[in-house]
Amino acid sequence: MSLTLPARRRLNREQLSPLSRLLSRLPLSRLLLRHEYMIALGRPCGLPGLREHPWRTVLTRDLVTDAVAEYIADPFLLRRGNAFYLYFEVLNLSTGWGELSVAHSSDLEHWSYDGVALRERCHLSYPYVFEHGGETYMVPETSERATVSLYRATAFPLGWEKVGDLLAGEAFVDTSLFHEDGPDGQWWLVTSTAHSARPRVYCAAGLRGPWTPVPAQSDADPTRLRSAGRIFRLGGQWYRPVQRQGQVYGEDVWLYRIELGAHGYRETLVQEVPQPLLGPPGVSAAGSPLSGAPPPGWNAVGMHHLDLQPDGDDFVAAVDGKSLILDASPRRALLRLRNKLFRIGR
């Protein structure tokens, strides 16, 4: 399947500053100049190949048929038999809130949209979906409710019910869980808050808790700590992708190795792969442009999510990226204006 993108005006990084200055002088310019997230999938050859992987399948908001979608982002994959299920955030301009939708595919290239899996009276994102004990669970971001909530599938892939709250009392964001191997393995939960990206780490004997805070050490700077996708195990090591806040929100993804022990939780930057692990094309690890950069495309402005899933001897990856577009849709512009004037949604 060849990579095709919708006919929307996409702008590269070099155009951002002068164009932003120009449009900032125009009334309500932000109704037309938008960051659009998209989702890409593929089978990269190992971690070092992620940065240069030629992503061939790119999904856009046009996949969504039951909402006026601003963008789709935060992809999480789940394998069921011969099918892949992709859960992702949809920012629905009709409600102003994020909703969680799902699509499925047998080959990672041709996708069918199933519909909305979870909709609440608050903004939802980061649909961290996983299986345990013969059940399918999801931990979405529900920071507006100041909780970390656990949901269980009752009629997969669209039917879900809330099981309970794992944490409460703060605006937790981008919560990721993982379980150590073995019958006595502990559960670990890594999260941040809307006010601080520094990792907050908890452990529990069972998925439903109770969750106990543990000491967390990280060598990351404060702009590069918020989770950016599923914590995964590869070659006997646990890894956590994190997103860096650069010139724009979610500019690129870095990879940290997790160490668990008597000291609690410690993570260090992975040195043996080029960093950032994912980012806009034509930008070096230091953030400077590279010569011969590709033309503007689906990830011309930033990347802020990675979901890595084992698949036999290989793995599959789902990522998101964003580009700056001029969106001339009157319907979307009017909904943005309404949401802004009446403070609807986010």
Image: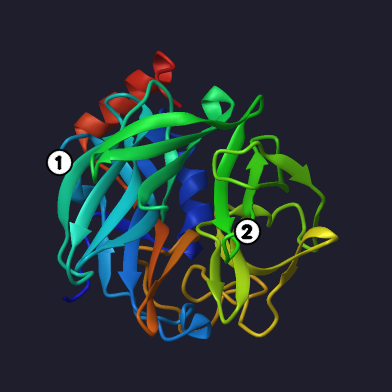
Q: Position of residue 197 (x, y in %)?
A: 69, 46
- Comparing 340 with 126, the one in front is 126
Q: Residue at x 47, y 36 (%)?
A: 150
Residue 196 x/y as whole percent:
72, 40
Q: Nearer the viewer, mark 2 or mark 1?
A: 2
In the image as oriented, which residue stretches furthest toward the front? 183
Going by the numbered disc 1, the residue's amino acid type is Thr
> Which quarter of the figure is the N terminus placed in?
bottom left
The residue where tag 1 is placed is 65
Q: Is residue 67 above or below residue 109?
A: above
Q: Is residue 191 left or right of residue 314?
A: right
Q: Specify whether 187 is left or right of 35.
A: right
Residue 249 visible in the current orientation: no
Few, some or many residues within 10 Å of mark 2 (<14, 14–19, 20+): few
- Looking at the picture, tell me which residue is in the foreground, 205 or 77: 205
For marks 2 and 1, give the CA distance.
Answer: 44 Å
Residue 184: numbered disc: 2
Query: Who's the residue at 44% across and 31% down the image?
Result: 163
Q: Is residue 137 left or right of residue 269?
A: left
Q: Position of residue 157 (x, y in %)?
A: 24, 46
Measured as percent of width and height from the top left, residue 225 is found at 68, 54
